[in-house]
Image: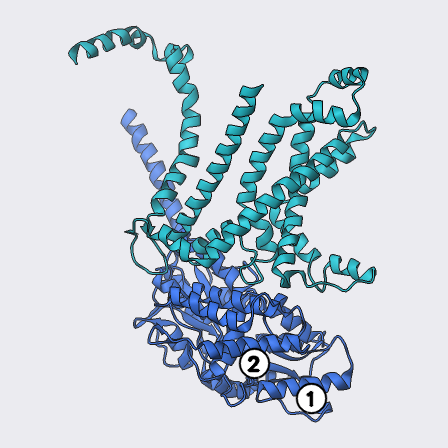
Amino acid sequence: MTTTSTFKSEADRPAARRSWLSRWSDPDDTTLAVMLLTPAAILLGVMIVYPVSRLIYTSFLDLSLTSGLPARFAGLANFRQMPDDPVFWQATWNTVLITLITVPGSLLVGFALALLANLPFHMKWPVRLSLLIPWALPLSFAGLIFGWFFHSEYGVVNDVLNRIGLPGVIWFNSPRLAFAAICLAIIWKASSFMAMIILAGLQTIPRSLYEAADVDGAGRVRQFFEITLPLLKPTIVVALIFRTITALQTFDIPYMMTGGGPGTETATLAMYIHQNTVSFLDLGYGSALAVVMFGLSMLVTALYLRMIRGSGAAS
Amino acid sequence: MISGRISRMAGLLLGCAAFVFATGASAETNLKVFVTSQGQPAIWRTLLDQYEARNPGIKVSIELGGTTSDMQAQYLNTVLTAKDSSLDVLMLDVIRPAQFAAAGWTSPIASDMSSYLRAYAEANTVDGKVVALPAFADSMFLYYRKDLLDKYGLQPPKTWDELADAAKKVADGEKNPNLQGLSFQGKAIEGAVCTFLVPYWSQGKVVTKDGKLDFDREAATKSLALWKGFADSGIAKKNIAEVATDDTRKEFQAGNVLFAVNWGYAWAMSQGAESPVAGKVGVARLPAIKGGEQATCLGGWEWGVSAFSRNQDEAKKLVAYLSSPEVSKYMAINGSLLPTYGNLYKDADVTKAVPWFADAQSIVETAKPRPVTPRYNEVSEAIRTTVNAVLAGATTPADGAAQIEARLKRIIR
């Protein structure tokens, strides 16, 4: 013990002798590393580590503000409640379904839009701007707008149907139609984000590759599958990670369009978490549900990361 | 020299401090009042202007948020969970004072409740403590087009069957595709809880007895089937699952509805200068299920003082004023909000402005309160989403009743 401490203090001495100012202005490597990492570590701690640990801690508590009782440790009671909760299953299933439909949906539409926008236009800005607008619109506005589109009496969708001689549909009376309308709104909203990321990726592909392919006699389709797609793969994976995680957290659009209706047929997990915490004030159960959603997001992210690493090793 | 400077500095500082404190004491108190947007905020504003004029140094501002009772509750829940002191006085739906008191969000108020209508004295007293004071009374009524009923020689219906017959007769005679027979609330909002409960209660059933669940699935099925029947037979419109309280009010006011289930506030607007139905509206007790009693849902809003307000005394003084007989009368005449004092229902000035208030007291006094439990929000959500699902055709009345029962069993044990 003594030896170590003597050794340490001796080793530190030259640094300690240097003036305070020079230590800060000309730090050694370790100090510099600590100095540079501290802000990020503090930010991460305050913004992510603390809230997430607090969330996990709360998920083990029996904490409901309506009971007037103080928080009590409840073990896994909140988690054990889930299997018997029909709304939990419905909301989770809807969330998974929205993810499975809207992620590929927005990828396909976004890809098509990006390819269109990447064509050699003379006036690029109107194309780029129209790509940006859906993305720039707040999610809840998009939900509100589509809610009105599909309103059975005042909506433009039924108006168009009537004009071409078809009867109007009460979209939000049917769980399936309401769900389809929600997915459509999400795909519209999310495609522009996908398109922008893919467009950025497209522009990093050197022209010379296509020129070489032309010389070798490869057609447009072959070029797309042999050059564009492989080179875009990392970009697509990144876009998919972002899109999948936001899809798992879907809240605003169904909340504004149907409020989860009819009944709870179109409720998502995020809406159910919001309802349990903000409306029912059952912070324990709400936190437990949020832990499940957190786990789901982590799982999906891990799968994607593995995909990237796998592809990195292969190439 | 040095000590002289210090003492001079200290003097200056003290002087500054004294100035700050003095202005702090004489500065005006700003009170922020949360008012429901369906509760005639513009007319409350005129009363607050008078209050400010009478109480120099007090400024009161109104805050609005959310278009339905449940949206407003969500907003207040977030503000009060955060122990935010920005709101001093809260206008609360009659179902909330008990919950808010249980959560410790409102301050008890010392007040004699004996002069108020009994239902409101009860709704605002929790464990012997007054937790809020009544703002206005309310219950659901049957609004009808007097001119159309007169034209076909009909009386306001006493049962839902009579209502259906009357609606058919008028529809056959008028041949107006835009005229709905009946409008009520089918959207998954707080009002849909009353939609379910009115015919349920009419069969003599209750939801809770002595704090325990006492649910009658058969009566529930009948209630849900009644409303679904109105939509299926074309008396109510097919998209009734999209209709919220103010949609009913607007469509009735536009002259497109024969019968409407709505709260008291709809009257004042239907009698406005621009209203095509002014002078053609009658108000009656809601009909009964055949063989049952005529039942209705107790409404009304209350004034609570936020436990986190930094102006407790001033806030309580304001609340005492806002729930006084003087204010209740003013709001009855100018906003058609039902009085919280029994004697005002027969007041000559009040009945001159709103003639049907003369008959409304007995309706309000026999109106039934929604189940009282701190977990009311969960009860409400179980009922209103099911009403919505049944009306949308996503669930049958029998399955809906079973779902309500299953969900209530998990909440009220």
Residue A111 lies, with reference to residue B282, above or below; the image says: above
- Looking at the image, residue B362 sits to the left or right of residue B114; the answer is right
- Measuring from the top left, give residue B238's x and y in whole percent: 67, 71
Q: In this view, which residue lies farthest toward the left?
A: A2
**Tag 1: amino acid:** Leu
The part of the image, by quadrant, that contains residue B237 is bottom right
**Tag 2: amino acid:** Phe
Camera sees residue B263: no
Q: Residue at x 36, y 36 (%)?
A: B12
Q: In this view, which residue lies farthest toward the bottom?
A: B153
Badge 2 or badge 1: first in the primary sequence: 2
Q: Give me the disc on residue B141.
A: 2
Q: Kindly state the secondary structure of the residue where label 2 is placed.
A: strand
Residue with the mark numbered 1: B149
- Looking at the image, residue B277 sits to the left or right of residue B313; the answer is right
Chain B pictured colour: blue
- Measuring from the top left, give residue B260's x and y in whole percent: 62, 78
Q: Nearer the viewer, residue A303 or B206?
A: A303
Is disc 2 in the same subunit as disc 1? yes
- Spot the cyan chain and give its letter: A
Q: Nearer the viewer, residue B365 or B116?
A: B365
Residue A34 lies, with reference to residue B227, above or below; the image says: above
